[in-house]
Structures are given as C-alpha cells and as structure tokens.
Image: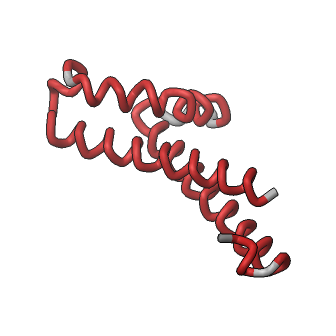
Amino acid sequence: MLLVLSIFKLIAEIALLCLAGQWLLGLLAGAGRERNSFYRIFQVLTGPFVRGARFITPRVVIDRHVPIVAFLLLAFIWLAVTWAKISLCLQIGVHLCR
C-alpha cells in the first residue's frame, strides 16, 4: 500500500511541476510559446491531466482555464495522498516508511 501511495504522489508531483513549468515558460516565451520545443514537451506530459480536467468540468469553463483546474485537482490529489501516506506511516511505524 505504501508503494501505491508513493507512486500516486510521485505522478502528482511530476504533473504539478510540469504544469508550473509550462505556465512559467508560457509567460517567458509569450506568443511564440507554441514553437518552443520545451513547451511542447510540457504539453505532451500534461495533456492527459488537462484532458481529464476538461472531461469533468462543465462546458461553461473556458478552455483557457482548464489547466488551472487540472493544477488545482492535482494539488488536491497530492494533499490527499500525502495525508494518507502520513496516516499509513503512523499506523505501521515511521521506521518502516523509509
């Protein structure tokens, strides 16, 4: 169970960092961000999470805001998994969670 929680936490962390990097690179690159290869790599990595957020959000949410929704959902998932991992470590003993 600890391994499963660690895997979900790691996936959420990678996706959160990719979304943050994509946002920052979009700010720095401006209008030419679509031609930037690193920006496109971030789009590929965050695509499944953004599409998942688009699937669960209502149509009134504009497409420009969907990455923000994905970021907030991933942050909530990360917090929930972190809390579950801490609870599990307290149950089985902190020395077994290393």
Residue 53 coordinates in the image, percent (x, y): 59, 36
Figure quadrant of residue 93: bottom right
Residue 13 coordinates in the image, percent (x, y): 51, 52
Left or right of residue 74: residue 7 = right
Residue 71, relative to residue 65: is it above or below? Answer: below
* Visual colour scheme: secondary structure
Task: Identify which residue, 48 or 70, lies in the foreground.
Answer: 48
Position of the N terminus, as image quadrant, is bottom right
Figure quadrant of residue 18: top left
Count up the numbered dots: 0
Q: Residue at position x 79%, y 71% from top?
A: 88
Q: Residue at position x 72%, y 67% from top?
A: 85
Left or right of residue 67: residue 97 = right
Q: Residue at position x 20%, y 19% from top?
A: 35
Task: Identify which residue, 51 or 10, lies in the foreground.
Answer: 10
Residue 2 coordinates in the image, percent (x, y): 76, 60
Left or right of residue 69: residue 5 = right
Q: Residue at position x 32%, y 44% from top?
A: 21
Task: Identify which residue, 95 or 85, lies in the foreground.
Answer: 95
Figure quadrant of residue 83: bottom right
Residue 50 coordinates in the image, percent (x, y): 52, 33
Residue 8, relative to residue 57: is it above or below? Answer: below
Q: Which residue is situated farthest in the top direction here? A: 35
Position of the C terminus, as image quadrant, is bottom right
